[in-house]
Image (cartoon, rainbow, N blue to C red):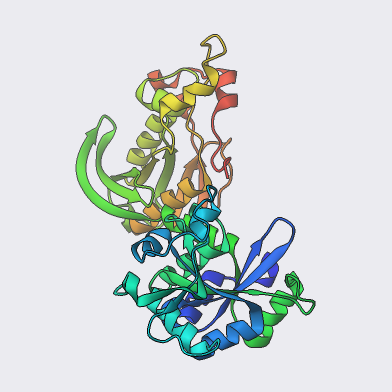
Amino acid sequence: MRGALPSNPVAAASAALRDGGIVLVVADSGAGYRGDLMAAAECATADTINAMATLGCGPIRVAMRSASLDRLEIPPADPTATGPGRELFRVSVGLAGDEGPGVRASHRAKTVRALADPGSQPHDFTRPGQIFPLGCAAGGVLSVPATPEAAVDLAEQAGLWPAGVLCEVCGADGELARLPELFELGRRHGMPVLSVDDLVAHRRRDLCRVRQCGSARIPLPMGEFRAVGFTDGLGRDHIALVHGDPAASAAPLVRVQTECLFGDALGSARCACRSQLRCALNRIVQAGSGVLVYIRSRDSGVRMLTPALPVGWQTTAATRHPVQHGDLLSAYDIVQQLGLREIRLLSDGGEEQFVPEQVRIVERVSLSPGREGAGAAEVSAAGRGSAARLGSAS
């Protein structure tokens, strides 16, 4: 399905929503694909509702965070329900004082906009009505990768109030539209098409972005460094150890070192992490300038012991923490923020050849921790075999 989508579907969808347009959200239902027309609730007009109802043929729903619907005192449609559907499906509503006769696009549009108005109060709505609210998880698609959460996230991504109006698309036979029909619908009406998976990947990438949060001089045995702190979207702190003025070099040495509590801090003989760390710092000092990016793990060192503990307490868990794709994205975001565009990467021969999007690696320089004196005791074959590979996870 990816080949049929634009190169940056989330950006295309955000631009369309800001202009008051409609986008087509595609989700894998397990038994096939389903498509929903989606617009930003605060931008909904009678024309928007009419177009969605005509093209989609499904009911008009408004996806909002559950907390917002609770504030408006819009209760679950089935108060006896106990599963996820209790929060999702809410009592239908209309706009008080504008009931009028029949099903009108203008009335439904006013109701949709009122739901997306932070100033609305519970008494502004009648119950039941012609609009069906959907309560969504606060974490969006990262919590529940489904179309209602995608609608809320997309509206917020576009800089609008986090509420989206949805209408499911039916095929010519009245059943769920098939994937080719969905793409043809998008093409025929000039609507951006994106998948829920696209939005999940986009949001995960956003969480990997970092912001600088301070710096300090730190003298090490190898030489003087400047420690620059960064925080990612998950709240983890990472450190860049900067020696000299690497931005003035055409392609400075850079090492991405992933956290290893047992190796770095305690000197475990089961991994080469401490010797690699010392070697990389020495090589950077010898080169006159460079950067070592130290990436914090998503799991604590203690939790890494847990799977091995039942086996007679003989654990080989004291190796570098597993590295996820997002960790490396954060690492190279840091490199980019330090003003580097081309680098020579210090790497172990066993590490995966990850290609970053933010900077260009002009050379991969072998890291040889075995030459670094006392910190370079011969690492056991078992330790080498269990060392984490960059990019091995996700």
Q: Position of residue 144 (x, y in %)?
A: 53, 54
Q: Nearer the viewer, residue 203 or 343?
A: 203
Residue at the image point whose x is 48% and y is 22% from the top: 305
Query: Measured along the vertical axis of the image, is residue 54 above or below residue 91?
Result: below
- Outermost residue toward the top? 312
Q: Position of residue 97 (x, y in %)?
A: 38, 85
Rendered image quadrant of residue 197 = bottom right
- Outermost residue toward the right? 173
- Outermost residue toward the left? 217
Q: Position of residue 291 (x, y in %)?
A: 35, 46
Q: How many marks?
A: 0
Residue at the image point whose x is 80% and y is 77% from the top: 173
Name the quarter where the N terminus is drawn: bottom right
Q: Is residue 369 visible?
A: yes
Rendered image quadrant of residue 381 = top right
On the picture, is 31 further left or further right than 57? right
Residue at the image point whose x is 34% and y is 58% from the top: 337
Q: Is residue 360 visible?
A: no
Name the quarter where the C terminus is drawn: top right
On the picture, is 255 further left or further right than 61? left
Q: Nearer the viewer, residue 183 or 145?
A: 145
Q: Nearer the viewer, residue 313 or 161?
A: 161
Query: Measured along the vertical axis of the image, is residue 160 above or below residue 103?
Result: above
Q: Position of residue 224 (x, y in %)?
A: 23, 38
Q: Nearer the viewer, residue 383 or 300?
A: 300
